[in-house]
Image (cartoon, rainbow, N blue to C red):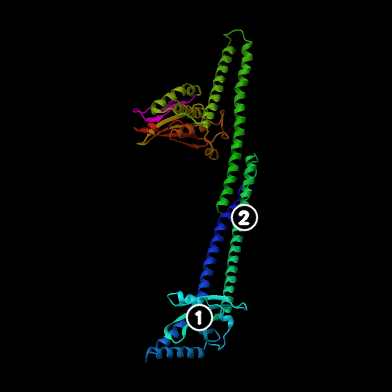
Amino acid sequence: MQSITRRWLKGSLLITVLVLAAAEALFLYNSYQNLYGGVQGAMQSRFSTFVGRLQATGTAGDSLTASESRSQSLRRIVEQFEEKDKFEFMLLDASGVVLTTSSGTMNPTLLSVGEDFYEALNNASGFGTVIFRTEHGERVMAMTCLVPYAAGSIAAMRLVTSLTLVDRQWYQMVTISLGVVLVVLGFTLWSGLFFVRSIVRPLGQVEATANRIAHGDLKTRLPDTRYDDEIGRLCKTINQMAEDLTKTEKMKNEFISSVSHELRTPLTSIKGWVETVSNIRDPEDENFRKGISIIGSETDRLYAMVEELLDFSRLQNGIKLECQVLDLVAEVTDAALFVEARIRQEGLHLVYEEPPEPFPVWADPSRLRQVFVNILDNAIKYSEPGGSIFLTLRRTPTTVTVSVRDQGRGISPEDLQNVKLKFFKAKNAVRGSGIGLAVVDEIVTALGGTTDIASTLGQGTTVSVTLPAYHAGQEHLHEPI
């Protein structure tokens, strides 16, 4: 498995090295051309001066006289050459043999190479250049220029200069430029590793903490980071995830405890009354009838709880919606009729005025009835005897809304934001599994609607379900999920 550091070394650092190498090569090439090209340019400039003098010499008389005049002029130039400390100036015949030099001596170390003369003969420009080492190991540059006019036996001019100073300057530039490249590369490597490690180290800590959380250690947390960047936000997200998991785990445990208690209570009642009824021989006995009634109601209660748990399990695995065009008014009225007997049994009043016109929606009838029965059941459970439950419907051009308001104990502000969470039960919750509103919210969301809950502690709670109003062409919505 490759690490971020290794990927950086293979990626960004390699690109940096290639760019630096290309820049160094380009710089050295230009420097070389400037240095050694400058020497060549200086020689060519002097040849141009000499040729200019020749052009003004020997313009009178016949061609032979003019040729001799040019020859004498060139020899005087050699004798009077003022840059003997920089160049050795030579005159060559048509065979490349040196006729005379500015130093007056025939230095064999400067005459041993004649490639520049032959290059000049074959070059249309009449110039030839060569760099060679003398027998003493000194690097020199020689340039030959063919004389463009007849000048007696003189066929070419030659300048030779030492490259010792130029080579020294070249080596200094190479050394300095390589030093700069190494400094830049070293700084890039140091700063890159520093930056990468500033990412890798926190990520390693995040990885270790996430592994501990994944293995069940929900108390572990990442330390607060001083960086307000992606790493800092990731650490905060991991910590928030751990908080949420801790909260979910706590709610799950409370849910299991609550469900166990809710299941144990009716089972205990059923068991006790079964024992009581089994000892009664007279079916007309009041306790017999009461026991049968309690056993039936507690069984219904158990059945409702099991169905709620099964619904929750189905929601977790994905629910299948079988939608059709429904009249929301009729569906709400049916749900109200379904719980009407229980409302009267609890000493409550249902305030409901059925709208005269239908409210069409595209929904699953069984799921929609489950939503309204659950909401009404909650309103009944949390209402005091003598109170009222208000059921209202309203619509806009695009939505329809059903609201159920009770006059019960209400929900505290700190619990209100969590009542739709799975497994959550508020502090003042009564019997139930604690997943009823979670089921309601899941179904309404699947139908493309929203569930809103407003409550005031001690005054009551209002649950509103808003669904899209049906319009032709909505049949493709809410496919099975």
Image quarter for residue 10?
bottom right
- Name the amino acid, label 1: Gly
- Name the amino acid, label 2: Arg
* Foreground disc of the pair 2, 1: 1
Number of the label disc, if any, that sits on residue 197: 2
Residue at image mark 1 = 96
- Examine the rendering and report whether any part of residue 227 can be seen: no
Q: Is residue 416 above or below residue 223?
A: above
Name the residue nearer the viewer: 120 or 97. 97
Give whichever of discs 2 and 1 has the lower sequence position. Answer: 1
Horizontal and vertical percent position of residue 110: 57, 81
Image quarter for residue 294?
top right
Horizontal and vertical percent position of residue 160: 53, 81
Query: In the image, is residue 289 part of the stretch drawn in magenta?
Result: no
Q: Is residue 243 above or below residue 432?
A: below
Name the residue nearer the viewer: 19 or 166. 166
For the magenta stretch, what is the residue range?
347-365
